[in-house]
Image (cartoon, helix red, strand yellow):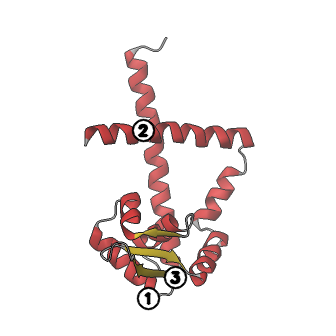
Amino acid sequence: MVNESEKLIRSTQLLRSFWSIQKNIVRFVQKTAVENGLSVPQYTVLMTIILQKEMTQKQVGEQTFLPKSTLSQAVDGLVRLGLLNRQQLESNRREMQLSITEKGEAFLKKMHLQDGGIHHLFQSAMEPLTDKQYEDLLESHLILSTYLESQAREGM
């Protein structure tokens, strides 16, 4: 049985582990973004949209927690670069639909293959993991994330 002192130590170790990973993710996201002529918010927007191909700007904001002005500036820049399309929704003229362009998909693919970029680093970091370890890691993250999101919703 785990006593209160051991629980505190374990929760602190887990939190410090996530802080360390987050610090390094931020460092390599910044490096990858800069090396590809993007701001961190622009990179964040692209990475948020890529899996679904299109989302509303509001949905992107909800997932990234970027302030509206930062999000708007990031989207404007990505549209100017030809990496994103932006259209008004017919059902709600105040809302914008964002979608990745072919140029945007090619750009992200190039970034994913870039030596020293965050995607390359994560691929390398995963290599020593067995399939089971990888699946267990994702499952553990999902459990923690789901719990933290439910606590955040209850606290709002």
Residue neighbourhood size for the residue with mark 1, other residues' Cα within 10 Å, grouped as few (<14), some (14–19), many (≥20)? few
In primary-sequence order, the first of circles 3 and 2 is 2
Instruction: State which quadrant residue 66 falls in.
Output: bottom left
Badge 2 element? helix
Whether residue 70 sits left or right of residue 31 in the image: it is left
Mark 1 touches mark 3? (CB < 8 Å): no
> Mark 1: which amino acid?
Arg
Badge 1 element? helix
* Label of residue 83 in the image: 3
Distance, label 1 to label 2, CA atoms, is 39 Å
Whether residue 67 sits left or right of residue 124 in the image: it is left
Task: Pinpoint residue 71: horizontal percent, then vertical percent.
Answer: 34, 71
Residue at x-position 43% and y-position 36%: 147
Closer to us: mark 1 or mark 2? 1
> Mark 3: which amino acid?
Leu
Residue identified by numbered label 2? 15
Residue at x-position 50% and y-position 87%: 82
Task: Pinpoint residue 45: horizontal percent, then vertical percent.
Answer: 45, 69
Task: Pinpoint residue 148: horizontal percent, then vertical percent.
Answer: 40, 39
> Mark 2: which amino acid?
Leu
Closer to us: mark 3 or mark 2? 3
Residue neighbourhood size for the residue with mark 2, other residues' Cα within 10 Å, grouped as few (<14), some (14–19), many (≥20)? few
Residue at x-position 38% and y-position 16%: 4
Residue at x-position 64% and y-position 37%: 136
Badge 3 element? loop
* Label of residue 80 in the image: 1
In primary-sequence order, the first of circles 1 and 2 is 2
